[in-house]
Image: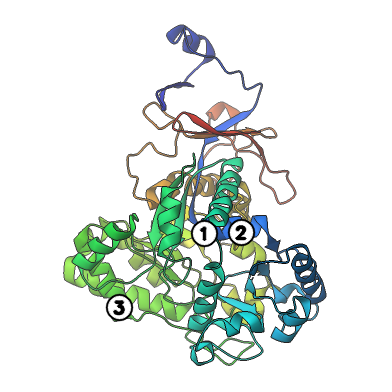
Amino acid sequence: MAVSDGTVVWVGLDKPGRALHPDAEIIDLDGAFVAPGFVDPHVHVTALGVQLMGLDLAQARSLQECLDTVREFASAHPDGVILGAGWDETTWAEGRPPTREEIDAAAPGRQVYLARVDAHSAVVSTALLDAVPGIAEARGFTGGVPLRGDAHHRVREAALGALTRAQRDAARQVALDAAAANGVVAVHECAGPEISGADDVRELLEYAHGVEVRAYWGQAVRGADQARTLVEELGVHALGGDLFVDGAIGSHTAWLREPYADRDTTGTSYLDAEAIAAHVLACTEAGIQAGFHVIGDAAMDAVVAGFERAVGELGGPAVASRGHRVEHAEMITPDQIAKLAAWGVIASVQPGFDAAWGGSAGMYATRLGAERAATLNPFAAMAAAGISLAIGSDAPVTALNPWGAVRDAAHHRTPGHQISPRAAFAAATRGAWRAGGVRDGVAGTLVPGAPASYAIWDAQELVVAAAADTVQRWSTDPRSRVPGLPPLAPDATLPRCLRTVHRGVTIHEA
């Protein structure tokens, strides 16, 4: 492969390549594997960096281990707000989250904010609650249990607001370095007023790093002028990402038609069909990509109804032209899949969710019952209907590990929902560029004219594989020259990134 001025200019056999480019710098990869760089279409950069730098509770195997980790961190860091994330009570024998009293005992007098793994609820200390006026009257506040909804958003704002600019920049550096070290050349930041605030997204867009950042802002608008003004004021690229229609299944805040199996609630709704339609209409008229965070089946009902109203007013081609998005789309029916496909709506999905919480004994089955849980994340049905998929992580909710996400999509816990490794890889590269509005036909590939954005991997022998339960649509014979991928079986060692290059510039080297 020959690269000039950040663009791939030639691909072919070694001898003619050297003859055509006699003065080029030659880099011998010694058998390493070269592939297009990954794009993660759903990331929270600063939050990821804070977790990587500080109190990561994802590895806590019990409630007691979680509390011990908080106690040790508080002792080692005697000043400032304690920010932690990643705990998941469904994996603990105790089966419950920490109480406020237990947190107060682990970090006496300290302001402590500990987000659940899905980031849609949190347990906090008394000192932090006392610092947020009127919190007891906020929607989603319940004494003694995790905060949800508006109460959670207000407490998170107070906790993150205690970080200095230097601390936020340090977190961004760590997070983007981690992205580059995993072969990721671009990320889509999913910001919003209830997530990280306007200052955070402005600072992120100002921050210089080799990993490209596309910023989404999750705030609903009701007119084209309002949409244009908001984009201009914040400097963001689109009005979507985590624009919440509902919450998350693990926190009992995903909006369901029928109550949860393990709690008498149908979750939380933030936007109805009318508000969704107004946002889609405004963004379409303004020429801005829109999108929504949608997980529960009732939330998807509202999203589809909202899009349907917009299509009825503007027409399908006008709506499809903007490449609007839905994030997560975990509970979706075949009829809804067909409608979204017809309207050109892109699905930004996270296979790591199913890997972490799917299966007959997983969190989904506990929260929803086995029958409903088996319908979640139907990647194969979405792809077959023509929905363009973009695969990401929602980091720090699941790890920013693109090869792991590709493997998880190919080994879905529910038979029939998986896609082939090739389709998953395309969704994590070409599909993710497309989800960010890049439709040049070459981004996410390595062909002449494409950006020289690629990663070099230490990988095992390459293989050509299809999804286990689908008809084989291509030859696995090496003579067919179908491109291979590293082995992605559940027990296979994933590739190790040796170098990441974006538009011809090296942004990571092992």
Which kind of residue does numbered mark 3 sit on?
Ala
Q: Secondary structure at mark 2?
A: helix
Front label number (1 vs 3): 1
Q: Where is residue 58 shown, x and y percent of the image? A: 70, 64
At numbered mark 1, what does the secondary structure look like: helix, strand or loop?
A: loop
Q: Amino acid at mark 1?
A: His
Residue under circle 1?
44
Q: Position of residue 214 (x, y in %)?
A: 40, 51
The residue nearer to you, when weighing 138 against 413, is 138
**Which residue corresponds to the image point at 77% horizontal and 67% vertical from the top-left?**
60
* Residue named by callout 3: 275
Q: Residue at x 36, y 74 (%)?
A: 303
Nearest to the observer: residue 346 or residue 217: 217
Residue at figure coordinates x 70%, y 34% from the top left = 460
Foreground residue among 11 and 108: 108
Residue 180 x %, y %? 56, 41
Please indicate, yes or no, whether residue 470 appears anywhere in the rendered image: no
Q: Which residue is mark 2?
A: 50
The amino acid type of the residue labelled 2 equals Val
- Mark nearest the camera among 2 and 3 is 2
